[in-house]
Structures are given as structure tokens and as C-alpha cells.
Amino acid sequence: MPQLERSVSTVRQPSGWRKPTPGLGIAEQLAQAGEQVAVPKTRAFVAVKRVGAYIGLKAGDLMLLDTLGAFTQAQDWEEGQRPIVWASNAYLMEQTGFSLSALKRHARRLAEIGVISFQDSPNGKRWGRRDAEGRIVEAYGFDLSPLAARVEEFEELHVELLAEREICQRLKRQITVARRMIR
């Protein structure tokens, strides 16, 4: 993860809707960094799914992330854009089968791990609009920009995990050979 300051002061002014934490502050910094990169949507989702269990994501978290990703369009992942999803809780609950508390829990975990960020409106509601070309003009909701910012980190982590797995398999084979030689 890029060196980011672990400080609650980096979180936007508290709106009274959400308790600020260091994790949410880092997610916001990642969202700003993610706005500066262009990453294909599929590359971002493949990268996070490959390392999801290792970074602490659970199956429900990935299901919610997939559901949120379905709302984004290719142009949302271009440089200078932010893929923000403003789907209602009711719709997300219908799509995922989660209760409201489970939906909030999974969203919070995604934000604390630094995969999404919350883009809160002044009144706490999620909404957005697109222009005639389909680009997001204004939106409040779940911001997937942190995912774009961390794609390279996740891909490097995946390569490291594969290398570690290969070493473990090689060592297991050596142990098996040594056991058979001892017999």
C-alpha cells in the first residue's frame, strides 16, 4: 500500500453520518490517488479477487464489491474520473440477499481495508447524475477509486503469493522424498 498518513484528520469534515477512523482516512487518500490513474475495470476486479482472502476480504465483501462494480461503466475508470455507485440500500440488499446490518458491515469492511471509500452527500443520501456521454457529473455514494489506486499493489502481492505457494509445494515434495528415503 502506498505510504499514506495514518491520521483521522485526513478524513473530510465529519458530517455526523459516519464515525471517522484512520482506515476511512486512508481510503479517502486512496480514492484521491485512484482518480489519477486509468485502470480497466476488469483488471481492477481480477486483481482484488486474487488477493481478497489474503487482505482480509470475506465472500460477502467480494459479493458486495461485484454488485457495486456492476453499476460502473468503462469511462468511470479513466484518468480524472471516479467510479462512484449510488445504488440504494434496498436495491443492494435485494441483489445480495444481505440484511441492512450485514450490508453496512460489508461496506465498512471494504472501506476499512481500503478497497472503497464513502463519498457522503451533505444530507447523507446517495445520488448521482451522468451527462449525455455517460460520464459522472456529480455523485455521492460508494467510491471505487481506492481499488484503482491499489491495482498494481494487488498484482504484485499476487505474484508474491504465487512464489510463496511454489516454495511451499517444493518443500513439501522434498519432505516427502526425505521421508521415503528414511523408510
Image: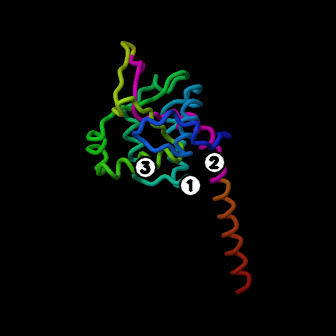
Q: Is residue 136 magenta?
A: yes
Q: Which residue is mark 1?
A: 54
Distance Cα–Cα, label 2 vs label 1:
9 Å
| Magenta-drawn segment | 134-162
Q: Position of residue 5 (x, y in %)?
A: 65, 40
The image quadrant where one finds the N terminus is top right
Q: Callout 2: few (<14), some (14-19), or many (20+) C-alpha neighbours within 10 Å?
A: some
Residue positioned 46% across, 44% down in the render: 19
Q: As displayed, is residue 153 above or below residue 132?
A: below
**Quadrant housing residue 17:** top left
Q: Closer to the camera, 156 or 171?
A: 156
Residue positioned 69% across, 64% down in the render: 170
Q: Which residue is mark 2?
A: 157
Q: Earlier in the sequence, mark 3 or mark 1?
A: 1
Task: For residue 155, say whether it is visible.
Answer: no
Number of numbered labels in the structure image:
3
Q: Earlier in the sequence, mark 2 or mark 1?
A: 1
Q: Which residue is mark 3?
A: 61
Q: Is residue 136 left or right of residue 152?
A: left
Q: Earlier in the sequence, mark 2 or mark 3?
A: 3
Q: Is residue 90 magenta?
A: no
Q: Callout 1: few (<14), some (14-19), or many (20+) C-alpha neighbours within 10 Å?
A: few
Q: As displayed, is residue 123 above or below residue 170?
A: above
Residue 155 - label: none
Asked if the residues shown at circle 2 and circle 1 are in contact, with their CB atoms under 8 angstroms apart, the answer is: yes
